[in-house]
């Protein structure tokens, strides 16, 4: 056990309304796992906590879409996501859920404590209300036309098309997503946290924080510079933690208020599961504990302003030591979007590749201080050119050569040359560099320095040429193998936080039976005579065909989810003079009859003002023959006549085709013969 403080690590609670994707892993779960695994190897007292965020509007919307209860949704995705995390080696000590009894009680205790201290402000406000559904409408329950881009399916919090942040009252012609009715403004009462009143206290605490990432502190300072406003801690909703007051029927704690408290309730459940119910206090209420929140960019404000304020106002809890948040991960050069199908789901990834490959590839491209990009081509390059060609190749060379020419045993190191000593020294050098990088949350740098040890091993193996010295100088060959195997052993622990499955496999190949700890990483991990068994190759190259399949899958899903893809693509541009050649007139259908031997064509008599035309149109399956006479239409009047089924057609009826393939008249109230321009 080290002399370091007790450590509690939390990872942002993912919403239990859908599966996990690449952005989740890169944003909030790989880095705390790297850190926790490293700290465990250091011998620190560390607990890693996470769980499902099971409240909020996205949950209720998902439930309504499927016609099930919110609990059904969260039960399904809680288990699904928990299993995916396990398969990816995310080593939580406990994975809880905010729908649990312990969480409800803990969150309510926090609210009650703050309320009894008179911290909250009660406000009466007007909110959109659906009288038919008999409920106030959260932002995602309101749809309307975006005031920015005129998209007609914008939500009350954001337009999915242009990305503009909105409030429900900004929408043009808002309607309830529940009933389709136009909502009304109605008064409701809520409890607010007066963040502005406690801003100075928060700022003083923030001034004591050291070594926070510039991107994190920059966002926090931006909010503080603008001045903190009151923020609602309750809302009108049927799903969530009920507000523990008699005069708050139908109100729940706002999800942003209750979700971070989930870290505390999950730690309580972890302690209970261990049979030491009071142990959670050691991590949350002991000043010798350090708290670290690993989150994504979108959670910075909640973990650096809101939650710390809640903890301070409640009292008796440790404050975050650091919040090493990551920025966003883009996908193939574009913003990741689950609604548009532009995402790689983790459970689908696992059908084709091993977890360690993605842990490494994402680890090398983490959005640590700015947005980064994942591409399948880069994934392939990382696997092939680094894992396979550098690390895997070095291990295979060292182990297979030992098996063939050293009886499969670690040979003695006798009278080592300077090149041998320098190679062994690189173990300690790289270990120190990796340690420094991880301690300062620079995981990309740490992974690079880990791989540099494998590069040094490869270079050493090539320069000492054991394939030549095995005949000319057997001891020099033995020394080359001894040093290379010691580097392999060091790598098997040094890279354990990143590649847990692969490094365990490597230690088995080396028959390493010593302690797996950070202190054990040295130039003498393997004893002379230790049995070596190369076994299977650690990493195989990813073929072009495998990558092409993944890219095609991504593009097909995006096309299927792109609302614009449901319509016929736009045709090539034409010149204005070409458009002006069209003579489009308002008309009225006077007669209509079906053409014999055709189930699509109709013979129409159309008054275009100047004259009455016969027009053949393929709309028989899309119109009501009893109502078509008298229908106002738009007619392209200067098309060259053409015979169809023996009938000469002099013009074309303009129709619009919807996403289901149905044709609708492009009608007009203009007088027959009027020019349409």
Image (spheres, rainbow, N blue to C red):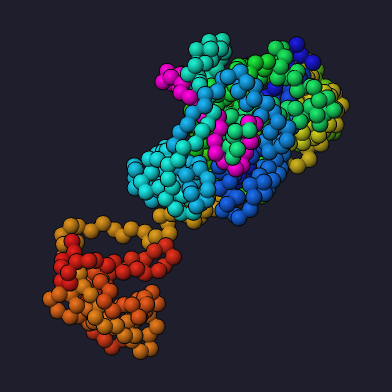
Residue 356 x %, y %: 67, 38
* Residue 518 left/right relative to 158: right
Residue 357 x %, y %: 64, 39
Residue furthest front in the image: 247
Query: Front-most of 563 and 343?
Result: 563
Q: Quadrant of residue 432?
A: top right
Residue 561 x %, y %: 49, 53
Query: Any magenta on residue 138?
Result: no
Q: Quadrant of residue 85?
A: top right
Q: Residue at x 64, y 36 (%)?
A: 241
Q: Quadrant of the C terminus?
A: bottom left
Query: Front-most of 32 and 144?
Result: 144
Residue furthest left in the image: 610
Query: Front-most of 508 and 326?
Result: 326
Q: Is residue 588 above or below residue 438?
A: below
Query: Front-most of 655 and 443?
Result: 655
* Residue 428 left/right relative to 525: left
Q: Residue at x 33, y 58 (%)?
A: 570
Q: Is residue 180 visible?
A: yes
Residue 215 x %, y %: 49, 23
Q: Is residue 162 visible?
A: no
Q: Residue at x 38, y 85 (%)?
A: 598
Q: Residue at x 37, y 77 (%)?
A: 624
Q: Quadrant of residue 449?
A: top right
Q: Is residue 542 above or below residue 449?
A: below
Query: Any magenta on residue 231?
Result: yes
**Which range of residues does the magenta coloring cover?**
222-245
Q: How many marks?
A: 0
Q: Quadrant of the N terminus?
A: top right
């Amino acid at each position: 056990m080290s002399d370091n403080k007790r450590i509690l690590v939390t990872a942002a609670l993912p919403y239990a309304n859908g599966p996990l994707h690449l952005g989740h892993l890169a944003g909030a779960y790989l880095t705390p796992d790297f850190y926790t695994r490293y700290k465990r190897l250091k011998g620190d007292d560390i607990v890693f906590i996470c769980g499902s965020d099971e409240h909020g509007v996205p949950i209720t919307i998902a439930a309504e879409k499927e016609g099930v209860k919110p609990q059904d949704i969260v039960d399904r995705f809680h288990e699904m996501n928990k299993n995916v995390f396990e398969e990816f080696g995310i080593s939580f000590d406990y994975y809880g859920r905010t729908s649990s009894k312990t969480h409800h009680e803990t969150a309510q205790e926090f609210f009650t404590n703050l309320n009894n201290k008179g911290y909250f402000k009660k406000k009466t406000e007007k909110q959109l209300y659906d009288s038919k559904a008999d409920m106030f409408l959260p932002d995602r329950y309101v749809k309307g036309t975006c005031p920015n881009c005129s998209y007609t399916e914008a939500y009350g919090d954001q337009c999915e098309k242009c990305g503009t942040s909105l409030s429900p009252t900004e929408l043009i012609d808002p309607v309830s997503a529940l009933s389709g009715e136009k909502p009304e403004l109605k008064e409701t009462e809520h409890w607010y946290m007066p963040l502005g009143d406690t801003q100075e206290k928060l700022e003083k605490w923030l001034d004591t924080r050291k070594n926070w990432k510039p991107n994190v502190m920059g966002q926090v300072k931006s909010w503080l510079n603008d001045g903190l406003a009151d923020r609602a801690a309750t809302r009108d909703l049927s799903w969530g933690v009920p507000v523990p007051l008699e005069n708050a029927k139908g109100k729940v704690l706002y999800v942003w208020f209750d979700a971070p408290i989930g870290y505390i309730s999950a730690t309580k459940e972890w302690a209970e599961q261990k049979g030491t119910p009071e142990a959670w206090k050691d991590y949350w209420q002991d000043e010798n504990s350090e708290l670290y929140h690993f989150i994504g960019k979108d959670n910075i404000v909640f973990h650096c302003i809101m939650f710390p304020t809640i903890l301070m106002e409640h009292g008796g809890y440790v404050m975050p030591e650091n919040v090493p948040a990551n920025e966003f991960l883009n996908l193939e050069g574009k913003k990741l979007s689950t609604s548009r199908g532009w995402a790689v789901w983790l459970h689908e990834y696992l059908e084709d590749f091993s977890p360690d490959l993605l842990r490494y590839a994402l680890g090398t491209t983490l959005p640590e201080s700015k947005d980064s990009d994942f591409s399948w081509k880069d994934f392939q390059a990382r696997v092939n050119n680094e894992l396979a060609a550098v690390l895997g190749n070095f291990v295979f060379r060292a182990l297979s050569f030992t098996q063939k020419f050293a009886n499969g045993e670690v040979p003695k190191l006798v009278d080592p040359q300077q090149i041998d000593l320098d190679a062994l020294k690189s173990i300690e050098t790289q270990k120190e560099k990796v340690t420094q990088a991880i301690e300062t949350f620079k995981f990309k740098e740490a992974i690079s320095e880990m791989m540099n040890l494998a590069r040094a091993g490869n270079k050493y193996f090539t320069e000492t040429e054991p394939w030549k010295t095995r005949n000319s100088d057997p001891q020099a060959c033995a020394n080359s193998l001894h040093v290379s195997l010691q580097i392999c052993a060091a790598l098997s622990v040094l890279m354990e936080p990143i590649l847990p499955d692969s490094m365990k496999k490597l230690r088995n190949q080396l028959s390493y039976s010593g302690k797996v700890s950070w202190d054990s990483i040295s130039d003498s991990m393997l004893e002379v005579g230790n049995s070596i068994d190369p076994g299977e190759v650690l990493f195989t190259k990813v073929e072009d065909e495998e990558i092409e399949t993944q890219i095609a899958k991504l593009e097909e899903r995006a096309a299927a989810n792109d609302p614009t893809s449901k319509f016929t693509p736009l045709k090539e541009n034409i010149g204005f003079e070409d458009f002006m050649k069209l003579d489009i007139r308002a008309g009225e259908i006077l007669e209509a009859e079906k053409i014999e031997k055709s189930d699509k064509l109709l013979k129409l008599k159309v008054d275009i003002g100047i004259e009455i035309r016969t027009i053949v149109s393929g709309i028989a399956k899309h119109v009501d023959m009893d109502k078509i006479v008298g229908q106002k239409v738009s007619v392209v009047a200067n098309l060259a006549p053409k015979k169809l089924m023996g009938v000469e057609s002099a013009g074309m009826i303009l129709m619009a085709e919807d996403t289901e393939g149905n044709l609708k008249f492009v009608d007009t109230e203009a007088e027959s013969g009027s020019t349409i321009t």
